[in-house]
Amino acid sequence: MCYNWLTILLGKIFKTLRNKIDLSGDPDALFLNPWREGALKLLEPPEYIWRAREGGTIEGFAISDHDAINDKTDSFIRTTQRHKSFRKPVEINAVPAVVERASFRKSHIFAGDKMVLSGASATRLFNAFRAEQLEGHVEAGNVLSAFLKDCRKANAGHEFPVETLFIESDLDFAVECRNTFNYYHFITESLAQLCVLDGVGFQGNIYFHFPNNEEKQLPFARSFVEALFPEFAGRVFFERAPKDYDLVLTAFEFVGGMGQVPQAQLKGIARLAPDDSDVGSVEFHPVLAMNAVNTTLLNLRARALKAIEGHDFSHLPKRFFVGRSLDQSRSRPLAGQDLLLEHLIAFGFEHVVFEDYSPLEQVALMAQAEMMISHHGAGFTNMLFASPDAYVIELGTLQTAQFRWGDFWPLANASGCKYISFFADFAAEDQLKEPKFSVDGIVPTFVSEKATAQVMAFVVTILGQSPNMPDAGKLEELAGRVLRAGAAPQAITVLADHRDMVENNGALCLLLADCHKALDEPKSELLALEAAFRTDPSRWQTLVRIIWCANRIERPEVIRSALSRLAAGFPERHDAFVANHDWVRFVG
């Protein structure tokens, strides 16, 4: 008995030691360059590595009770949109691959004695490398960027190795998991990898390898595999890492290895990325991840929506607030929820908990949703299944904006929905004290009475009803948010229902013009611009907009009038405009 106990203990110790990863060395010795090293080969040449795609609407608004927090939040949103938001999102391919001498350790894949930079695993490896290097975070980042740059240079003119002999073989397929208890990570990073097997004629078994203790594994992992991949029934297994294979199939997700892609293939991405981006560097990697949609996500979405076809889900609500299951160990309740729910229920919302529904019901809930509202959490993973017409509203804090907002961008861009975040206050004794993520984790959200009023004004307007706004400033704030959220018609409605305020306010007239511009209604835009200048004749920019808008709809008399007013009130601006635009001299 003692011998058996000692054997089990030594086995656990040995397994734990084998599961450790040492990242203290040089990147060349740590990370695989699959273009030049043959330990990982694709089953077939990829049709593409990346391509531009249309995405969803992503916006964030500050609704704290404290001006200091709102200022920080607004600044963060502006900086993110200017320096981290692509002009258009990109779809990045993921393909089946065969790995020789494969080893699954923690949540990573080794090919031989080198780690594979694939998918979300690459992000974790980059972060861990920086943390373990003695020279510090910045220097370690420079070392990684130099390594990736050398890879791009070395890979120029080289094709990714391909080995078609393993198509329709009975090799096993293995997936690395960050864990099997976090819904977001399992669904988006692990489960989605199974989609690379579509059309391959796969005959083997599937293994999910995870680093957490077996007792932490939650049943949702198995239930979603069974619901969305029924063809693999009886062939799916969950095993704790480490696990070795002489030869195994897996998914290679280019999003993790884009820093190694030959430079010539990254030029197009540079045109979509923010102007100050160092494309290909390790600093660019998280920015790319925010704006990238993995092909596996798109395929998982398509598979899930197909799985609910032909079923009756008419019992499910179309407007709902998603609460947390009380048995969740990491539950972070929303402070102020009762008041918000009271108002939402008055407009036809229901309170739901995703865990109370089967996998297919969860998919159908989002696919049929008109509007979902919840506080920050893994439940927003289900945004992947939302309709492009759906509004998915998140209630968070400055902290979730800084550390978690970008995680959900790929899901919004995959579904094409409207993902709108309201950043409120911390549910803390001192709401002005910013928590430290490394110490405090994610601090719960508090939605005050004032914040609730702002959320409800937005919700009601989106749903086609106009709240009574107390003053022009609040009206401008609301209509501006609604416009930025992709709902120009509703913004026009709420402005029209407060016509007395709009007619005497230049900023509101300009906002109305912006609404008509968004709807490609230049005649109505011109009328609003004329009203804006009448109300506030101090803005030369309004006259310039009038000239451009009138030119578009061929109104030369309006152009001449605007030029005359520009010359009379702003001669320097007039001369500069005419000098830079020869066409205005030929206006009839």
Image: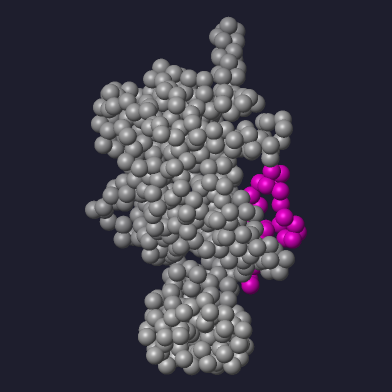
**Residue 57 at x, y percent in the picture:** 46, 62
* Residue closest to the eye, 88 or 495: 88
* Residue closest to the eye, 216 or 511: 511
Q: Kindly indicate the quadrant of the structure image that contains residue 313.
A: bottom left
177 relative to 183, above or below: above
Task: Determine if the magenta segment contains residue 433.
Answer: yes
Residue drawn at the location 59% of the way across and 70% of the way down: 452
342 relative to 426, above or below: below
Is residue 186 something one can see in this rendering?
no
Which quadrant does the N terminus fall into?
A: top right
* Residue closest to the eye, 159 or 235: 159
Label tally: 0
Which quadrant does the C terminus fall into?
A: bottom left
* Residue 189 relative to residue 67: left or right: left
Residue drawn at the location 74% of the way across and 61% of the way down: 432
346 relative to 173, above or below: below
Q: Kindly indicate the quadrant of the structure image that contains residue 6.
A: top right
**Residue 394 at x, y percent in the picture:** 53, 60
446 relative to 18, above or below: below
Residue drawn at the location 53% of the way across and 66% of the way down: 341
Residue drawn at the location 44% of the way across and 50% of the way down: 268
Magenta stretch: dominant SS?
loop
Q: Which residues are magenta?
A: 424-450
**Residue 285 at x, y percent in the picture:** 54, 44
* Residue closest to the eye, 316 or 574: 574
**Residue 68 at x, y percent in the picture:** 72, 66
